Amino acid sequence: DVYKRQVPETSPYTVTLPYTPIDGSILMVDQDGKPVTEAETTPSAGSYTILDDELTFNAADKGKTLFVCFDYTALAVKSFGLPKSGSRPAMQAVISGEGMGEDESTFYDVAIIIDKCKATGNINPPEMSREPKPQNITLKVLKPRGNNKAVDFKFAARA
């Protein structure tokens, strides 16, 4: 993560980070993109010293906006991943959109509800680009739960 911080206008010129960085992992730039470096002892303009999660700056840097990125050791983490079998769970799908009546003057909010389905085939993420790309996913409709309809269509006329 990148953390945006501002050096205080008054002494002490210290900034506290949300986590304690791993030694040597801090990358920092000021609002102009100029690197801010670690000093050995007393910080001069454009540098800092560090003790645990606290950064100390020179008075010449007061009020300066900084962008800080660093590695840290998390105290607790949760892990997740794909199951070994690679099977996909059954799910309910709700597809929403808008529709137009046959008279072409009445508009509807539309929901297609698939009670139980499973994604099949390849699910590849769309290629990266500045413009949105369509995503195609094939859903296999499964036996519905209880007395539900396998696929239900709902239309609500717009006021």
Image (tube, rainbow, N blue to C red):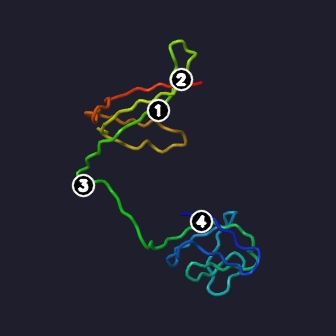
116 vs 85: above or below: above
Which SS class for mark 1?
Answer: strand
N-terminal of the pair, mark 4 or mark 3, is 4
Mark 4 or mark 2: which is in front? 2
Left or right, 157 with reference to 45: left
Q: Disc number at residue 157?
A: 2
Tell me: residue 88, above or below residue 71: above
Residue 84, disc: 3
Q: Secondary structure at mark 4?
A: strand
Regarding mark 2 in the picture, which secondary structure is present there? strand
* Disc nearest the viewer among 2 and 3: 2
Residue at disc 3, secondary structure: loop
Which residue appears farthest toward the front when viewing the image?
147
How far apart, in angstroms, are the residues tagged by discs 1 and 4? Answer: 37 Å
Q: Earlier in the sequence, mark 3 or mark 1?
A: 3
> Mark 4 touching mark 3, by CB under 8 A?
no
- Where does residue 123 sit, x and y in percent of width and height? 35, 42
Label 2 or label 3, whichever comes before in sequence order:
3
Residue 82 placement (x, y as % from top left): 31, 54
Residue drawn at (61%, 69%), measured in percent from left and top? 28
Q: Which residue is mark 4?
A: 3
Instruction: Give the residue at x 55% y 81%.
Output: 52
Q: Callout 4, which amino acid?
A: Tyr
Within 10 Å of disc 4 (Cα), the crowding (few <14, some 14-19, many 20+) is few
Which numbered mark, 1 or 2, is in the foreground of this view? 2
Of residues 153 and 51, the one nearer the viewer is 153
The CA span between labels 2 and 3 is 46 Å
Q: Are marks 4 and 2 in contact (CB under 8 Å)?
A: no
Q: Which residue is mark 1?
A: 96
